[in-house]
Image: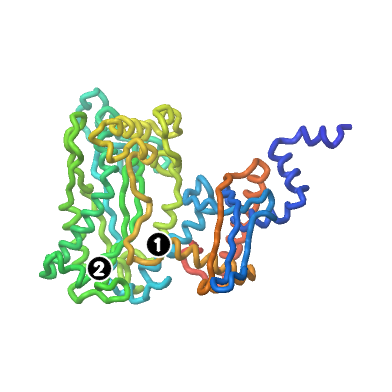
Amino acid sequence: MLDRAARLRQLTEADQDVIRRAHAPEFARWLEQIAATGGCAHPIHLTGSTTVRDTHSGEILHHYGTSAEPGERLLVRCRNRRATVCAPCSRLHAGDTFQLVRAGLVGGKAVPTEVREHPRLFVTLTAPGFGPVHRITAETERCRPRRYAAPCGHGRPTRCHARHTAADPLVGLPLCSDCYDYSGHVLWHAHTGELWARFARGVRRALASAAGLVQAEFPAHARLSFAKVAEYQRRAAIHVHAVVRLDGPAGPHDPPPPWATADAVTAAVRAAARAVRIHSPYSPATGERAMRWGAQLDVRPLRSSAGDEGPADEAVAAYVAKYVTKGASDTAAGTDHRLTCPDDIETAVVSPHVRSLMRACWRLGGLPEFAPLRLRAWAHTLGYRGHILTKSRAYSTTYATLRAERAAHERTAAGIDLPDDSGTTTDAYWRYVGSGHTPGAALIAAGIAEDLALNREIASAELKHAGRWGTEQITT
């Protein structure tokens, strides 16, 4: 018979860690911290304290410190939006995104419900072509059925008679990688932010012109608000999906002028998308590239009532919320982490097409004329330097406001009554001391996250059965 110590040594490192933690005297409090993070897969470890004092008397009204916590640490969420990195935090981020986008469409979160009557569009701006790629086909279609197409200059065929499903690994890959314009692709990504800024100015200019206004007078009559998300297509090129709304000069609380109709905004969007053009810095290696949006443009007014045509508000908000949680491995978006040297590119688990884009970023990033673009720092996103989701200031609420409201709700639910901020002084001293889980802690956190997810599914099913649930199930 083996003694207890010998039996423990036969267990895996994770199992041994679970047993050690379960027998620790502070296990119950540690488990409470894990549950409070929702089973976060990579929590942040902090040490420090917060003290709230009366400003006039100096009396301590509230104090919290980590000296009595397990390991003298407080665990907080990592707040990573990518489901491949932390599923619990990505779901929370998706819920916040849904509420943020939805509030700008139908009101709520300090946005008046009257915005539903304002002109609102769902706009998709695409990337131009950088070379023919394999594409998803319908059952009766073929990829590129060019009967008499000659081979390219590298001797490779320029046609493809195959039928590709969404699961086909060939989808998105160039027919000839040597013909593909990798330099143009990454330079276009690097200028996408400027393309959007000029597009937004172009929409305002076109609206002012249609209304008989000087461009400088437009802010006194109307205000353009938007929320946009960048989506990587299978060919690893960015498409921009945007909710565009036109308000009065004071923002969502102000009705738009009579001339501001959905048709007028649609015409302005189409005109601006066609007109925008910028140029990359001149380089002996690439010349001067003209950057513009792709030829494909989709502009659809959103429904203002049940009988109208167009996508529903909740469907648009749910689509945006679902996309922002996708990791790089779910799309052709590069990697979830930065690349520090060329060897990182060669060892990255990506397709040959994406690897070639990363190499182009690294190569062009070493040229002095492209130094301001910081292509090497953004090689992991294939040169794209923007956030996945951005919005204008007046569109709706903010992530910070939503998180503050959730924190206040959780404090109320836990029975924590903080003193009023007026007449108090807060002294906070916090320090980062680590992150992540030990092997055993990771197992326990994963179990808690799975239990919480199961509870949500059961509650969702019960609410839906009771007829109290809508068509979308993304909430905070």
Which residue shows up at 63% across the image and 50% down it?
445
Res 359 → quadrant: top left
Q: Amino acid at mark 2?
A: Arg
- Give whichever of discs 1 and 2 has the lower sequence position: 2
* Mark in the foreground, 1 or 2: 2
Determine the residue located farthest toward the top in the rendered image. 155
Residue drawn where x is 57% and y is 54% of the image:
76
Q: Is residue 12 left or right of residue 363?
A: right
Question: Where residue 174 sits in the image (x, y, percent)?
Answer: 30, 34
Q: In terms of image quadrants, where is residue 332?
A: top left
Q: Which labelled disc corresponds to residue 192?
A: none
Q: Is residue 40 above or below residue 254?
A: above
Q: Quadrant of residue 18?
A: top right
Where is the N terminus found, in terms of image quarters? top right
Mark 2 element type: strand
Is 108 situated above or below 334?
below
Label 2 neighbourhood size at 10 Å, few (<14), some (14-19), many (20+)? many
Left or right: 171 in relation to 270:
right
Badge 1: residue crowd in 10 Å (few <14, some 14–19, many ≥20): many
Residue designated by label 1: 317
> Is residue 377 shown left or right of residue 445?
left
Which x, y percent locates residue 179?
24, 30
Q: Which residue is pictured at 29% across the width and 55% down the height?
A: 124
Inspect this view and state whether residue 148 appears. Answer: no
Query: As shown in the figure, which amino acid type bears the numbered disc 1?
Result: Ala
> Which residue was labeled with disc 2?
223
Question: What percent of the width, then of the height, locates residue 16?
Answer: 73, 39
In percent of width and height, residue 260 lies at 20, 71
Q: How far, Cα to Cα, is label 1 from label 2?
A: 21 Å
Which SS class for mark 1? helix
